[in-house]
Amino acid sequence: MWSCITDFFTYETTKSVVVKSWTIGIINRIVQLIIITYFIGWVFIYEKAYQIRDTAIESSVMTKVKGFGIYNDKVMDVADYVTPTQGASVFCVITKMITTENQVQGYCPEAEKKYICKQDSECKKHLNKPGSYGILTGNCVPFNSTVNMCEIKGWCPAEIDTIKTISPFSLRTEVTFSLCSSRGNFPSTITDDYIKKCNFDTVSNTYCPIFRVGDVVRYAEQNFSKLADKGGVIGIKIGWICDLDKSDDQCNPSYSFTRLDAMSQRTAVSPGYNFRFAKYYKMENGTDYRTLVKAYAIRFDVLVNGNVSFCAYIVRQKQISSYSHGHKSPNTHVEKHFWPLEVI
């Protein structure tokens, strides 16, 4: 018991031994230099471990299309060739249309080759199965003077999808984007005169917000004529990789373009991108009829991603300074800018 008490009231210290050796001294300083270099060079300068990183950015993209086009000797405006009418981060530019006019509810022959028949028994095997353009009745009826088809009940006449592609649009369009974030997509050096004259390119005009659709398709490594024939989906990627410890002028977006539906090119089942819509009318006797349009389009998806890093202490001091001068915090500032697109 007494030994424990005496051991408790004792003092210990390490004994330092100095070894006067050039070899050991050099090794010791080299190890210390490596450790210091690692923390200063790698951790603080390269990795910037003192910063906070935020990859969950919030963004809003709006689109607006202006312009006129000529298709099959008809002048078309944005209500005819752009959908949806309300701008969003996804919009479509129609490049080919197959129109079936004056459709009414009734009975008519199918239009798909797989429904060619010679007698009713060949059509009855399709009963209780959906047809291409209506409900099959099981009857074999004349399609023209030489061919018979299975009969359907639905909107008649059935759509005939055999129209050849017309020449690509002779079109000049402006598409407007508005990116809402704490950083606008217009550098402070951009002027109105520059916006009216510039076109985006990957060499000399990397921050110009005006894009030609033909250029976008080319940057995505696609052939415009083939894409216009079957349709497709193009991704416009906006990347924000910013270090907020630096000047705001160094926080600018980067643009890249890619074909998002590349897998559809490898299948013959449903290649490209198309959709249908109808315009409905009413006859004087009250009968409904419609014009059915099958549209092939280039769909543009605007995708925003980013990685923002900053020193929390510096940002907090900026916020305190802003509040003390009666201004809004940088985090609450929203800039809206527009970048048009031209279709050729």
Image (cartoon, rainbow, N blue to C red):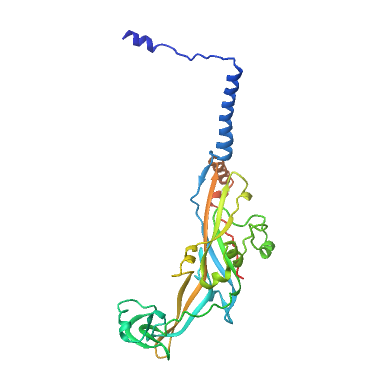
Residue 153 left/right relative to 18: left
Residue 4 sits above or below residue 330 on the image: above
Locate residue 191 relative to residue 57 in the image: left or right: right
Q: Is residue 339 above or below residue 114?
A: above
Image quarter in which the C terminus is found: bottom right
Residue positioned 68% across, 60% down in the render: 191
- Outermost residue to the top: 2
Q: Residue at x 54, y 65 (%)?
A: 63
Q: Can the viewer see residue 79? A: no
Q: Is residue 341 above or below residue 119?
A: above
Between residues 281 and 257, which one lies in front from this camera angle? 257
x and y percent of residue 90 in the render?
Answer: 50, 65
Residue sitting nearer the eye, 50 or 156 = 156
Front residue of this view, candidates 96 and 69: 96
Image coordinates of residue 151 in percent, x first then y, are: 35, 85
Frontmost residue, 232 versus 155: 232
In the image, residue 274 above or below residue 15: below
Q: Residue at x 53, y 52 (%)?
A: 306
Residue 302 horizontal/vertical position (percent): 52, 61
Q: Is residue 232 visible?
A: yes
Quadrant of res 278: bottom left
- Marker count (numbered): 0
Residue 2, horizontal then vertical, whole percent = 33, 8
In which quadrant is the N terminus drawn? top left
